[in-house]
Amino acid sequence: MTSPHDPYHCLMPYPPAAVPNGDGPLTGLSLAVKDIYDVAGYRTGNGNPLALAMSEVKTRTCPAVQTLLDAGARFAAKTHTDELAWSMYGMNAHMGYVQNPAAPGHISGGSSSGSAAAVAGGLADIAIGSDTGGSVRAPASFCGVWGLRPSHGLIPLDGVMALAPSYDTAGLFARDGETLLRAHSVLQTDAAPLPATPRLFWPVEMMSQLGPEQRALCEGGFSGLEAAELTGLYPDGVEAVYQTFLTTVGADAKDAILPFIRSSGMPLVRGIRERAAAAEALTEAEVSAARAARAEYTAHLERLLGPDGVILAPACHDAPFRHDDPVEVFDTYRHHSQKLLCVAGLTGLPQVVFPGGRVNGAPFGLSLIGPRGSDLSLIRLAITLTHVENPA
């Protein structure tokens, strides 16, 4: 049952509990929390009815959320998530779908759908989500807000449901870059800040995956910038890099989430059923080869970027599709988008997403990918770029 103050079906209808907060740099901001993060006084449902039924009321708030509360953020609500955070459409077979405030009738993106919609719809100033394969970046793009996938491992994930630990990250949403920077500055420091004039790259192989309208938005959004053409982003081809991503994230999920899926006897809905079966079927040889390929790809991209390189990139290949689109769209969209999203995921690099325009009436996000540890200065750079008037 949706709260009357929740027109987007993005908030979990839990009985309210007092969540204390402090006073600090986030005072005055309201915070929504994806329902895979433990918050004292609440259960943690993970988007799954059995997990919710098995969850006790938590007595401790996870460190990432507690840090935001201690800095003055006021807890607003827990938010809907795709089931077990293992999807990217914002549609939960058990709990319904989250509506997109920026594009009614279009998907909101998952698995941090509720967090993105809460911010886009003005129900919270900031919201914490998680990003494994794109679960902050895609919803940010789809809902027309800002979002960050941080450098992997820099924000603690204690007290957070694990899906694929070598990919899982905690990232925030905000309606503007300044607020995103303000909030992420509480969670992390700039471990490896960018120089005042970073090297900018135009990723030829990424842009070739876009349609004409989507590419035009990228060209317009990044116009006036001196960016060198980057080739070799996918040294063995797009499909090979994407397959490395699928195998390694599946191997992680096989260890982290499949035990719950099998032991609980949960009904497997379309999408999760196929992903679970693919993960379970992976052999040790396949996993070992893919992890070696991932390490090689990470080293390759780190060499390309160095300490000062930034990739100007689309967040996804297209704007969000409609809920009533044919099933073929549902089956293919994820694969197309993750061929772009997997670059930062595989390598553990930070990626900030911000609004770039609209395609067919729905938001389309642009992004920057930077060196590991450049998270805060990457947000600052994105703010600078969005404040520069492009030449007519």
Image: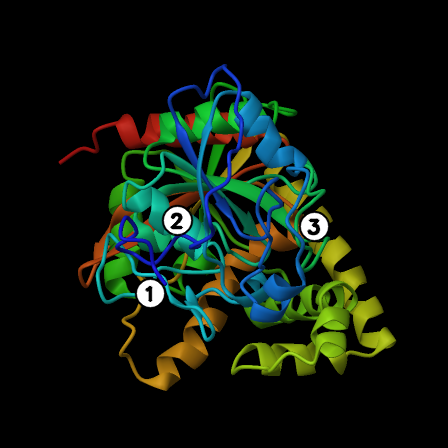
Tell me the amino acid under the disc marked 3: Thr
- Judging depth in this view, the residue of 358 and 179 nearest the camera is 179
Which residue is depicted at the point 51% across and 64% down? Answer: 338
On the image, the x and y values in percent for residue 66 come to 60, 31
On the image, the x and y values in percent for residue 342 come to 57, 58
From mark 2 to mark 3, how far is it between C-alphas?
29 Å
On the image, the x and y values in percent for residue 114 come to 41, 53
Label for residue 107? 1
Are dots 1 and 2 in contact, CB under 8 Å? Answer: no
From mark 3 to mark 1, how far is it between C-alphas?
31 Å
Residue that mark 3 sits on = 298
Which residue is depicted at the point 35% across and 25% down? Answer: 384
On the image, the x and y values in percent for residue 27 come to 43, 19
- Judging depth in this view, the residue of 146 and 368 nearest the camera is 146
Q: Is residue 268 left or right of residue 17?
A: right
Q: Quadrant of residue 239?
A: bottom right
Q: Is residue 268 left or right of residue 316?
A: right
Snapshot colouring: rainbow
Which residue is depicted at the point 21% across and 29% down? Answer: 389
User: Disc 1 on helix, strand or loop?
Assistant: loop
Residue that mark 2 sits on = 116
- Judging depth in this view, the residue of 21 and 180 nearest the camera is 21
Of the image marks 2 and 3, the number of the one nearer the N terminus: 2
Question: Can residue 314 be seen in this snapshot?
Answer: no
In this picture, is 226 found above or below 85? above
Which residue is depicted at the point 56% across and 69% down? Answer: 49
From mark 1 to mark 2, how far is it between C-alphas?
11 Å
Tell me the amino acid under the disc marked 2: Ala
